[in-house]
Amino acid sequence: MMRFFAFKAFAHPALGSGRFTHYARMDTDSFFTTHLAVDPFKEAERLGALYGFSMLWNDQPGMTGGMGGAVAGWLREQGRVPAGGGLWKAIMGSEWDSTAPDGGARYNGDQFWNNFEVVDLRFVQSKDYWSLLDAIDKTELMYTVRLGDACIRTAAVAALVPDHMVRSLSYVGYQH
């Protein structure tokens, strides 16, 4: 399931048809607790957001091992720096360090609780997103440390999305 939500969901033909601009995930055991006064899709579009999240949480220690190094390695290989400087610093514990082999990345386990998220498909269907996910997949961390889709998405957002294009959906009453 984690691999599906990290990778495969965005390759589904229905999402590649051009009919949709955004994707929302809401797990089957989730529900809205209040009336939606604001349409999260329209709000994301109005704000120019590529990623919307409901909350941050921290995964269990040991479940995200190697994540920071994997993403930093890809950034270095691509000759890039993290697009989300503030988010990168928050989840990696330090600013990008181009002199360190791992970019100074020590992923702390903080991640978007992505069982409710609104995502602009241009982001998750971009060549950069797929290239980064391919690099993460090749590490086999999903199998060796149970790396989940939430930390993969969070790290991808921190690496590829400017901070001002990441928005909180805290105005949406939601329970999982």
Image: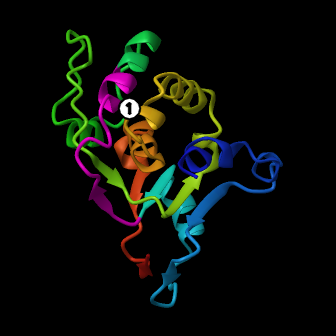
What's the coloring here? Answer: rainbow
Q: Is residue 49 in sight in this rendering?
A: no
**Segment tinted magenta in the rendering:** 54-72
- Residue 10 is covered by the magenta coloring: no
Residue at the outermost left position: 94
**Left-right relation of 4 to 48:** right
Q: Quadrant of the C terminus?
A: bottom left
Q: Amino acid at mark 1?
A: Ala
Which residue has dot 1 on it? 83
Q: What's the residue at 72%, 42% (across, down)? A: 11
Q: Nearer the viewer, residue 98 or 32?
A: 32
Q: Is residue 31 in sight in this rendering?
A: yes
- Residue 57 is covered by the magenta coloring: yes
Q: Position of residue 172 (x, y in %)?
A: 44, 77
Q: Quarter-wise, where is residue 23 in the image?
A: bottom right
Q: Identify whether 161 is placed above or below 5.
A: above
Q: Quarter-wise, where is residue 27 in the image?
A: bottom right
Q: Nearer the viewer, residue 49 or 125?
A: 125
Q: Identify whether 174 is placed above or below 140.
A: below
Q: Identify whether 142 is placed above or below 132.
A: below
Q: Position of residue 64 (x, y in %)?
A: 32, 39
Label 1: few (<14), some or many (≥20) within 10 Å? some
Q: What's the residue at 20%, 18% (across, down)? A: 97
Residue at the outermost front position: 144
Q: Position of residue 69 (x, y in %)?
A: 31, 23
At mark 1, the secondary structure is: loop
Q: What's the residue at 58%, 52% (across, down)? A: 1
**Left-right relation of 175 to 20:** left
Count of labels in the image: 1
